Image (cartoon, helix red, strand yellow):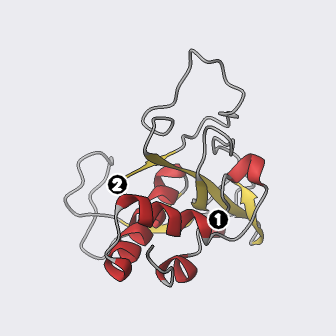
Amino acid sequence: MVVASAGNDNINLDTDPASMIVLPAQLNNVLSVAATAPVNQSEWDRRASYSNFGGRTGVDLAAPGGDNAVGNSRDLVLSVCSQYQLTLPFACGSTSFLLLSGTSESAPHVAGAAAVVQAQTGGTVATVTRCLTSTTDLLPRATFGAGRLNVARAAACAPN
């Protein structure tokens, strides 16, 4: 199963030119994930200011990705910082954390949920995809595809 970030360009993937494609998010058989975020710790299911969107051809579902558009660091996603990372301009210790935002933070929520669903159901990629997309919390479909990830409901999904 391939889970991919929808991208951080604030583009409506349903109306972008046919000659433009966000890879790998818009490929067939890829689960594309947009980002939701709060604004000042309220309105938790808003589209993150940077997140690509489009529920017809561009986004399958959404998950928390954090946002810093209004400068509130509490709206970001808390993430671990690996002591083995090579790209940051500083060293992370074994107990370091980062505050981040992006669809790269939302896609791991879905990938982790997919692993939980597969472990619970023993299902195929099609079953896992169905469980993830049919158990979401509903949000505007035109923006978020099936809606926002609901891990608890997805994990309780019955295999077919």
Q: Kindly indicate the quadrant of the structure image that contains residue 150.
A: bottom right
**Residue with the mark numbered 2:** 1
| Crowding at mark 2 (Cα within 10 Å: few <14, some 14-19, many 20+) | some
Q: Amino acid at mark 2?
A: Met
Q: Secondary structure at mark 1?
A: loop
Can you say whether 83 is above or below 119 in the image? Answer: above
What residue appears at the point 19 percent right and 59 percent down from the top-left corner?
84
**Residue with the mark numbered 1:** 148
**Where residue 54 sits in the image (x, y, percent)?**
69, 41
Disc 1 to disc 2, how far (Cα)?
A: 19 Å
What residue appears at the point 30 percent right and 76 percent down from the top-left corner?
95
What residue appears at the point 61 percent right and 18 percent down from the top-left corner?
18
Horizontally, is 5 left or right of 64 in the view?
left
Mark yes or no: residue 86 visible.
Answer: yes
Q: Kindly indicate the quadrant of the structure image that contains residue 134.
A: bottom right
What residue appears at the point 45 percent right and 35 percent down from the top-left corner?
27
Can you say whether 41 is above or below 106 in the image? Answer: below
Looking at marks 1 and 2 on the same chain, the residue that comes earlier in the sequence is marked by: 2
Q: Secondary structure at mark 2?
A: loop
